[in-house]
Image (tube, rainbow, N blue to C red):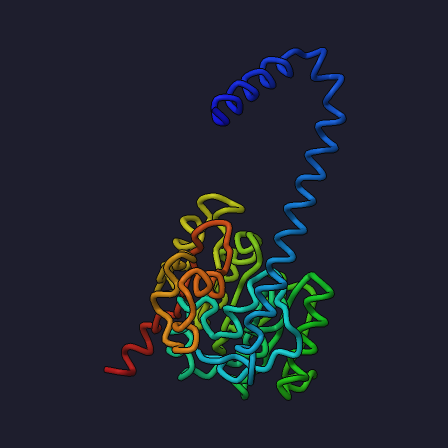
């Protein structure tokens, strides 16, 4: 009975408000109620997130729990533009963990973190490569301030060896020494198309790149960028794991003891779409191959 009344009411409302004159009269009221409803949903979501964070604060001890940045200290209980719990648990962008382990053996003259947010990668990479000069870039002043706090909390000195800047440009990359080996780590929300021009890639033929590609911003972007690297670099495309299945690779027994819904929520990165990264490593020069022979 209730379902029948509900359906009839819905039909009545659709027919009534399909009349342009009636809709013109009631539209302002409908907008007000729609805004109130959206505000209520937003408040409920914020309350849930805060309650969930409080529930699992006990997991946030001694910094990042595992992964390539294990022990990295967070001086605040939040992340900028990304999910907080996956970072602290050590499972954030776990798809890149094998890549970072592989690159640990390299000596980089400079490392550039383009789109550093609160400094997770910038400070983590500075700790991983203590002899490399690191430059962290972000247009957001709050992100630069957080990166500064993160560096200080992890005893990374701000200065010539660790710089925080607001913008990375093609001109800056073209000024790098092409004979040296650099690491470019990029998460710049679609700007990668403009930043990594054929000229930049050719100039940095000895360097390695990890580029998060934002096809949801510019469809086809990964397919456009990958061929630019093909003549100078070995190109690998790495795909993200969907939030629903990230728990399958968890090794943290304390997390595995939780109910599955909470595991999924703790590990969720809440991306708008499946993401891809370009992992581009420099190819040996022909002269270097001859030397090896």
The total number of labels drawn is 0
Q: Where residue 193 sits: x, y (%)? A: 53, 52
Q: Where residue 2 sits: x, y (%)? A: 50, 27
Residue drawn at (54%, 75%) of the image: 111
Asked whether the viewer can see residue 249, the reply is yes
For this rendering, which residue is in front, 75 or 60?
A: 60
Left or right: 254 as drawn, with respect to 76: left
Q: Is residue 44 above or below residue 89?
A: above
For this rendering, which residue is in front, 8 or 215?
A: 8
Residue drawn at (65%, 49%) of the image: 42
Q: Where residue 34 sits: x, y (%)? A: 68, 34
Q: Quadrant of residue 157?
A: bottom right
Residue drawn at (27%, 83%) of the image: 292
Left or right: 258 as drawn, with respect to 14: left
Q: Residue furthest left?
A: 293
Q: Is residue 69 above or below residue 27?
A: below
Q: Quadrant of the C terminus?
A: bottom left
Q: Quadrant of residue 230?
A: bottom left
Residue drawn at (27%, 78%) of the image: 290
Left or right: 94 as drawn, with respect to 37: left
Q: Quadrant of residue 51?
A: bottom right
Asked whether the viewer can see residue 194, the reply is no
């Amino acid at each position: 009975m209730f379902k029948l009344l509900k359906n009839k009411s819905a039909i009545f409302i659709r027919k009534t408000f399909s009349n342009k004159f009636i809709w013109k009269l009631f539209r302002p009221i409908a907008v007000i109620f729609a805004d109130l409803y959206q505000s209520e949903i937003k408040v409920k979501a914020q309350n849930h997130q805060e309650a969930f964070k409080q529930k699992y604060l006990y997991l946030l001890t001694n910094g990042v729990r595992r992964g390539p940045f294990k022990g990295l200290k967070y001086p605040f209980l939040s992340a900028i533009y990304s999910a907080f719990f996956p970072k602290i648990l050590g499972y954030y962008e776990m798809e890149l963990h094998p890549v970072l382990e592989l690159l640990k053996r390299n000596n980089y003259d400079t490392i550039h973190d383009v789109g550093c947010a609160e400094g997770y990668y910038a400070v983590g990479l500075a700790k991983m490569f203590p002899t490399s000069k690191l430059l962290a870039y972000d247009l957001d002043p709050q992100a630069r301030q957080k990166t500064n706090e993160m560096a200080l909390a992890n005893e990374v000195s701000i200065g010539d060896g660790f710089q925080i800047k607001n913008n990375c440009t093609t001109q800056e990359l073209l000024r790098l020494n092409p004979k040296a080996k650099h690491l470019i780590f990029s998460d710049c929300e679609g700007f990668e198309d403009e930043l990594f021009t054929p000229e930049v890639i050719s100039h940095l033929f000895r360097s390695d790149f990890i580029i998060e590609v934002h096809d949801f911003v510019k469809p086809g972007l990964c397919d456009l960028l990958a061929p630019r690297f093909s003549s100078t670099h070995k190109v690998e495309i790495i795909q993200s794991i969907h939030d629903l299945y990230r728990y399958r690779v968890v090794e943290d027994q304390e997390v595995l003891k939780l109910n599955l819904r909470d595991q999924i929520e703790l590990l969720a990165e809440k991306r708008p779409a499946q993401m891809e990264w370009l992992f581009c490593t420099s190819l040996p020069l022909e002269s270097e191959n001859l030397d090896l022979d």
